[in-house]
Image (spheres, rainbow, N blue to C red):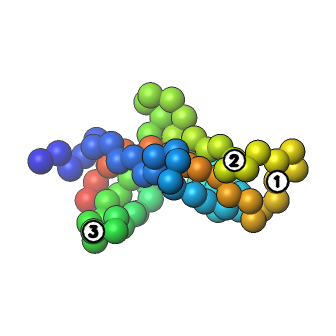
């Protein structure tokens, strides 16, 4: 069982939505290279992770309804790529 260096992908780019405000907050967290974050998955497992940029961007997002001037309340579909670095 791999505990370190295991990829964790959250979202599928279609059914996983965040508001623009949430996305901006997440993007800001991702800008600090190597910063560790603790996550808890819905099944209760916890991991310490970093944002994974090995195969492209750590966060991908698209507007659900394309708007020329989105607000913080508008929704985006997301894919978030993480990499485990240690146990929680």
Q: Are marks 2 and 1 in contact (CB under 8 Å)?
A: yes
| Of 81 and 14, the residue lying toward us | 14
Q: Mark 3 points at which residue?
A: 43
How far from the left and from the top, in percent, is residue 20? 71, 57
How far from the left and from the top, in percent, is residue 18? 61, 59
Q: Which of marks 2 and 3 is in front?
A: 2
The residue located at (50%, 54%) in the rendering is 15
Q: Check the image and report above or below for 54 versus 15.
A: above
Q: Tag 1 or tag 2, which sits nearer the N-term?
A: 2
Q: Name the residue under label 2.
A: 63
CA separation, marks 1 and 3?
A: 33 Å
Q: Mark 1 points at which residue?
A: 70
The residue located at (26%, 59%) in the rendering is 87
| Of 31 and 79, the residue lying toward us | 79
Tell me: 68 left or right of 75: right
How far from the left and from the top, in percent, is residue 38? 40, 63
Residue 50 seen in the figure: no
């Amino acid at each position: 069982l791999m505990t370190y260096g295991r990829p964790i992908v959250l979202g599928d780019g279609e059914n996983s939505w965040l508001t623009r405000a949430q996305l901006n907050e997440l993007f800001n967290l991702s800008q600090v290279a190597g910063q560790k974050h603790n996550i808890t998955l819905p099944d209760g497992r916890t991991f310490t992770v970093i944002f994974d940029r090995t195969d492209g961007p750590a966060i991908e997002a698209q507007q659900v309804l394309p708007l020329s001037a989105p607000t913080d309340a508008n929704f985006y579909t997301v894919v978030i790529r993480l990499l485990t670095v240690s146990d929680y």
